[in-house]
Image: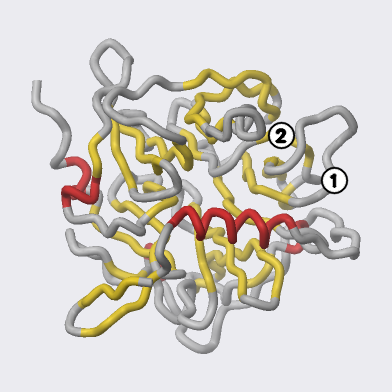
């Protein structure tokens, strides 16, 4: 382990994000014997502890220095939180949490009567480990990794399931396809990690996914100059203008889209103030904030730290 000094205090961190990736997949791969509950919109009651209201769980927005997101509410110092997603209107937030002695759970909180509810497990995922949620920016679908047995003949773990928003809540989950860490832009383009070669050459790739009725039907691998190794965890900006990702299970990179639609050179964000252990990035639907995993918590920072790196024409 190494020690990072942050605001005058020592913070211990693991030796490699590759280890975190392995741990995440191992924990997600465990499953319980119970059958999942029928899909429905879980009942939620406003929290009486903090009575949080306002955007982003009532948290003071960060500047260009990263901060832990919603400490004690989302980011619990005794647990491991990773990967979250807000609804486009900012009224719902989904994230995953695990501990040393429990399976990975998909939690959510939402605004009820102007107050954020206490985070609770999404009922339709009970029975199998779940994580890495993503709400599409049309607010119609929720994707999440789920260790439920896959339909016969379909690619196996790691895989995504999807639910559709209905007038009475979420639909029954159905198999979407193989992938790891998913994001989408306002034009509906979906990106994930292409895992199809991981068992042959050991590599993973970033891919744009063609989707039909929520199901992945084709993976188009992306070509990003000035980076080599295994690419993973693609996070597309809401406007599609840049892509954040990890390389070799390590730190964050960004690539900006060129005028001709191709991707520009990968920029190593550790050279621009990011912690080498930061990974699994997500941009808020309004494009204002960048979220990422670090030291077992979810952190956030003003997206200007990335926007200011955009090449000038």
Position in image of residue 130 (x %, y %): 69, 56
Crowding at mark 2 (Cα within 10 Å: few <14, some 14-19, many 20+): many
Check the picture and name the quadrant holding the N terminus.
bottom left
Distance of mark 1 from mark 2, alpha carbons? 13 Å
Q: Which residue is mark 1?
A: 149
Position in image of residue 54 (x %, y %): 38, 68
Q: Give above or below for 262 relative to 196.
A: above
Q: Nearer the viewer, residue 203 or 299?
A: 203
Position in image of residue 114 (x %, y %): 48, 70
Name which residue lies at 66% across and 34% down: 199
Q: Give above or below for 259 relative to 92.
A: above
Nearer to us of marks 1 and 2 is 1
Name which residue lies at 58% across and 62% down: 96
Check the picture and name the quadrant holding the C terminus.
top left
Q: How is the image coloured?
A: secondary structure
Q: Give above or below for 283 relative to 263.
A: below
Name which residue lies at 30% across and 53% down: 289
Residues at badges 1 and 2 in contact (C-beta under 8 Å)? no
Name which residue lies at 51% across and 82% down: 78
Crowding at mark 1 (Cα within 10 Å: few <14, some 14-19, many 20+): few
Q: Which residue is mark 2?
A: 176
Q: Nearer the viewer, residue 59 or 102?
A: 102
Q: Nearer the viewer, residue 261 or 207?
A: 207
Judge from the rendering whether residue 27 lies leftward or rightward of residue 185; answer left or right. Answer: right
Q: Give above or below for 245 relative to 169.
A: above
Task: Tell how many labels.
Answer: 2
* Circle 2 SS class: strand
């Amino acid at each position: 382990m190494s020690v990072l000094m942050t605001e005058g205090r020592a913070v211990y961190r693991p030796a490699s994000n590759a280890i975190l990736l392995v741990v995440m997949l191992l924990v997600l791969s465990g499953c319980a014997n119970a059958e999942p509950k029928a899909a429905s919109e879980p009942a939620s009651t406003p929290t009486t502890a903090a009575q949080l209201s306002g955007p982003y769980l009532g948290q003071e927005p960060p500047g260009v220095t990263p901060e832990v997101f919603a400490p004690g509410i989302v980011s619990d110092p005794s647990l491991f939180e990773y990967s979250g997603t807000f609804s486009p209107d900012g009224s719902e937030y989904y994230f995953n949490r695990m501990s040393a002695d429990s399976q990975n759970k998909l939690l959510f909180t939402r605004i009820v009567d102007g107050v954020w509810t206490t985070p609770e497990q999404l009922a339709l995922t009970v029975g199998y480990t779940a994580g890495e949620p993503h709400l599409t920016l049309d607010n119609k679908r929720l994707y999440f990794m789920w260790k439920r047995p896959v339909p016969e003949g379909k690619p196996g773990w790691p895989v995504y399931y999807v639910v559709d928003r209905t007038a009475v809540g979420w639909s029954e989950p159905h198999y979407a396809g193989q992938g790891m860490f998913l994001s989408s832009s306002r034009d509906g383009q979906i990106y994930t990690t292409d895992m199809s070669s991981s068992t042959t050459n050991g590599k993973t790739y970033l891919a744009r996914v063609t989707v039909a009725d929520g199901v992945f039907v084709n993976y188009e691998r992306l070509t990003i100059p000035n980076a080599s190794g295994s690419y993973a965890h693609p996070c597309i900006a809401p406007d599609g203008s840049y892509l954040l990702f990890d390389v070799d299970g390590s730190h964050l990179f960004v690539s900006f889209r060129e005028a001709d639609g191709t991707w520009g050179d990968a920029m190593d964000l550790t050279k621009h103030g990011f912690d080498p252990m930061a990974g699994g990035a997500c941009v808020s639907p309004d494009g204002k904030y960048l979220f990422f995993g670090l030291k077992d918590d979810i952190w956030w920072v003003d997206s200007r730290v990335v926007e200011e790196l955009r090449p000038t024409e």
